[in-house]
Image (cartoon, grey):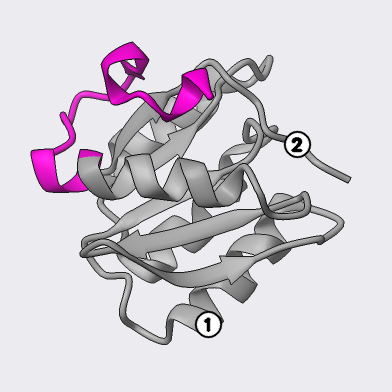
Amino acid sequence: MVGADPSTWQVVTARQPTATELADAALAVRVVARVGSNAIVLVRDGAAVGIGAGQQNRRDAGRIACDKADGRAAGGVYASDAFFPFADGLDGAVEAGAGLVVQPGGSVRDEEVIARADAEGLAMVFTGERHFRH
């Protein structure tokens, strides 16, 4: 799985991810790749603490993941199996208090999503690999 290797990722935000965030992100990508789409996975301290899967849209998947995390995702990673088509897809990352968002990139609105991440103080990386599964 190419996208699970942090050395191949592209940081697209002003804020750089920390080493701890990158380690958690590698796990998050491996988990989100195996969850039914639309999927969001929250990881913190080497554990998946929230998973939202099989939803009609990424925002709902993010809300479910946040509910499941129940406050344990603060400072963690918010990973998506596919790109965010709109900036509001980051609502869950903000709600969870995540520090890093991981996604493949490739939306026509990537610049809007990156601008939202920057405005919220989030780091964001593009993996270049989509894991969308139905």
* Residue 57 sits inside the magenta stretch: no
Side (left or right) of 95 relative to 47: right
In the picture shown, does residue 70 fall above or below 61? below
Instruction: Name the residue at the front extreme.
Output: 1
Contact flag, marks 2 and 1 (Cβ < 8 Å): no
User: The residue tagged with tag 2: helix, strand or loop?
Assistant: loop
Mark seen at residue 68:
1
Give me the residue at 35% from left, 18% from top: 9
| Relative height, residue 34 to residue 13 (above, below) | below
- The amino acid pointed to by label 2 is Phe
Residue 124 location in percent, x, y? 34, 32
Asked if the stretch drawn in magenta spans residue 21, the answer is yes
Q: Which region shows up in magenta? A: 1-22
Q: Look at label 1 and name its amino acid.
A: Lys
Which image quadrant for residue 104? Answer: top right
The residue beneath circle 2 is: 132
Residue 42 vertical position relative to residue 12 in the rendered view, above or below? below
Q: For numbered disc 1, what is the local secondary structure? A: helix
Query: Residue 53 versus residue 75: which sits nearer the camera?
Result: 53
31 w.r.t. 71: above or below = above
- Alpha-carbon neighbours of circle 2 within 10 Å: few (<14), some, or many (≥20)? some
Q: Quadrant of residue 63?
A: bottom right
